[in-house]
Image (spheres, rainbow, N blue to C red):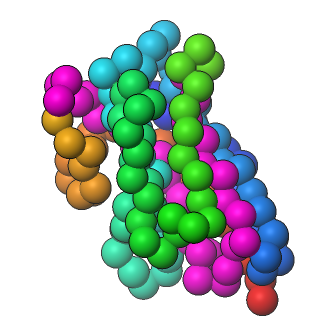
C-alpha cells in the first residue's frame, strides 16, 4: 500500500483546509487510517484516527472541536477537514495506515503504523 497526501497550503487563522490521503491499494479494508502532524522542533503527534469500518474515530483534544476525520471506502481515500485553523496547527501532516484485526482499539502511537505518506505542509498565518 502506498499513501499520497495532499491538500496542504497556506491559510490565514480562522480559515479551513481539507487534507486527502489516497491509497494505491484497491481496498483499505481492515486498515485503520490516521493523520499525524509534526511541527518544527516537536515530536510527531496523532491528530486523528478512523477505524477500517469508519464506525469509530478519535480526534486529539486540541482539534476535536475543529477537525473531522472521515473515509470514503469507494475511493480508498481518507480526509481530514480542518476548520477554524490556528497558527499552532502549522505542521507537516502525514497520513498513515496499519492493518487492524477486528476488535482492536484505535491506536495513536507513531510506532504502531507501518505505512506512511510523504506529508503535506500546512501553514497557518496569524
Q: Is residue 27 left or right of residue 43?
A: right
Establish if 110 lies above or below 21.
below
Q: Is residue 106 left or right of residue 92?
A: left
Q: Nearer the viewer, residue 110 or 51?
A: 51
Specify whether residue 36 is in view.
Answer: no
**Quadrant for the N terminus in the image:** top left
* Percent position of residue 12, x then y: 82, 77
Asked whether 25 falls inside the magenta stretch, the response is no
The residue range painted magenta reads 76-103
Q: Is residue 102 left or right of residue 40?
A: left
Establish if 111 lies above or below 122.
above
**Quadrant for the C terminus in the image:** bottom right
* Percent position of residue 33, x then y: 40, 38
* Percent position of residue 56, x then y: 38, 39
Q: Residue at x 37, y 68 (%)?
A: 44
Q: Residue at x 62, y 66 (%)?
A: 66
Asked whether 98 falls inside the magenta stretch, the response is yes
Q: Is residue 44 left or right of residue 22?
A: left
Residue 122 occupies quadrant: bottom right
Establish if 31 lies above or below 82.
above
Q: Nearer the viewer, residue 43 or 86?
A: 86
Q: Residue at x 74, y 57 (%)?
A: 17
Q: How many numbered marks have been drawn onto this rendered protein structure?
A: 0
Specify whether residue 106 is in view.
Answer: yes
Q: Nearer the viewer, residue 115 or 67?
A: 67
Q: Residue at x 42, y 20 (%)?
A: 28
Query: As drawn, which residue projects farthest toward the top?
Result: 26
Amino acid at each position: 500500500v502506498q499513501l499520497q497526501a495532499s491538500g496542504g497550503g497556506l491559510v490565514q487563522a480562522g480559515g479551513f483546509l481539507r487534507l486527502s490521503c489516497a491509497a494505491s491499494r484497491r481496498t483499505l479494508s481492515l486498515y485503520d487510517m490516521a493523520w499525524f502532524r509534526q511541527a518544527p522542533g516537536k515530536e510527531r503527534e496523532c491528530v486523528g484516527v478512523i477505524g477500517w469500518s469508519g464506525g469509530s474515530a478519535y480526534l486529539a483534544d486540541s482539534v476535536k472541536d475543529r477537525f473531522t476525520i472521515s473515509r470514503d471506502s469507494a475511493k480508498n481515500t481518507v480526509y481530514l477537514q480542518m476548520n477554524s485553523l490556528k497558527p499552532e496547527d502549522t505542521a507537516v501532516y502525514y497520513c498513515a495506515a496499519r492493518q487492524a484485526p477486528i476488535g482492536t482499539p484505535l491506536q495513536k502511537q507513531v510506532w504502531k503504523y507501518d505505512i506512511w505518506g510523504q506529508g503535506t505542509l500546512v501553514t497557518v498565518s496569524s
